[in-house]
Image (tube, helix red, strand yellow):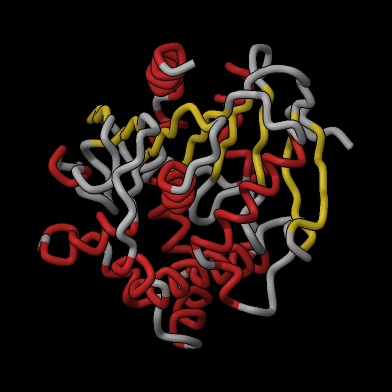
Amino acid sequence: MKTASGLALKTARLRGLETAWLDNENAGKPVLLFLHGFLDTPETWAEQAAAFGRDYRLLLPYGRGVGPSRPPEDKRRYGAYSILLDNLELLRLADPEGRLPVHVVGHDVGGVHAWMLACHPSPRLRSAAVLNSAHPKQYLRRALWPRQVLKSWYVGAFQIPYASEALLWVFHKRILDALTAEGWRAPGGSLSLADFEGAAVNAMNQYRQFVRDIPHFLGERAAPTDVPVLVISSEEDRYLEAPSTTEFADLARRVTVRVVRGKHWIHREQAERVDRLLSGFWSENS
């Protein structure tokens, strides 16, 4: 089945759960794994898919519980460590012999999962690009940043079951208007209330599991990754403060930080500029 973007919609059972992704089926080419964020679907990467589809194999998974990707009964399957295993399994399916180089790109919550791949890498992972996101350890340290706390108050609100779901239903129009002002676009051009509630609740379950996994994040004693990491941050991001280069000392040995003018959905707002940054980064780390 082909989507409007010309990509094939594929499904498989990954670790016991039906999982969906978009695939350009460009066999034999280096792999680009694009991971979307909060309230998005793979459509958020439409500009990047059009720009890079000829030269790369594109894999754009639906997040756990989004679209055709089945939500789990065990909420631990929303956690960063579990989704790391799902992404590794998807890469194995796409390239069973493990010969093709892989570059991962993540935005928002997808950036957390890109960091997880970078810090627990397979030998073929060549690079990770993180757009307006943070590693869980980095985010935890930012609990001491007053401006970051003000920007990310919603993470705490999401931890309150039932109440946060009710608020989403009551204020869904206002929330969608605020997201649109930041550059978000509704999948397919519109989003029903039911679709909004489903996408938002599944995303909240990821945030909730991140909090439950804090002891695991803090207990990790792994050395900084050798995988090159590109961090793209927007000056006017409503949800995240621009990074300090010192934040990455215990995470990665090779980090490139680019702070650009724009809002949270920078890959849609300034697609050509982001594509140039990505393309140059991949060329340096092919």
Q: Residue at 26% of width from left, 35% of height from top?
A: 253
* Residue 82 place in picture, x, y as percent: 57, 63
In the shown orientation, is residue 181 left or right of residue 37? left
Q: Residue at 69% of width from left, 17% of height from top?
A: 29
Residue 5 drawn above or below residue 83:
above
Q: Is residue 108 visible?
A: no
Quick one: 53 or 222, which is closer to the camera?
A: 222
In the shown orientation, is residue 93 left or right of residue 34? right
Q: Residue at 52% of width from left, 64% of height from top?
A: 203
Q: Quadrant of residue 136?
A: bottom left
Quick one: 263 or 190, which is closer to the camera?
A: 263
* Residue 267 place in picture, x, y as percent: 44, 31
Residue 265 drawn above or below residue 116:
above
In the shown orientation, is residue 212 left or right of residue 146? right
Residue 146 drawn above or below residue 171:
above
Q: How many marks?
A: 0
Residue 249 drawn above or below residue 253:
below
* Residue 44 place in picture, x, y as percent: 56, 39
Quick one: 66 or 244, which is closer to the camera?
A: 244
* Residue 181 place in picture, x, y as percent: 38, 46
In the shown orientation, is residue 209 left or right of residue 237? right
- In which quadrant will I find the N terminus? top right
Q: Residue furthest right?
A: 1
Q: Residue at 18% of width from left, 46% of height from top?
A: 247
Q: Is residue 19 visible?
A: yes
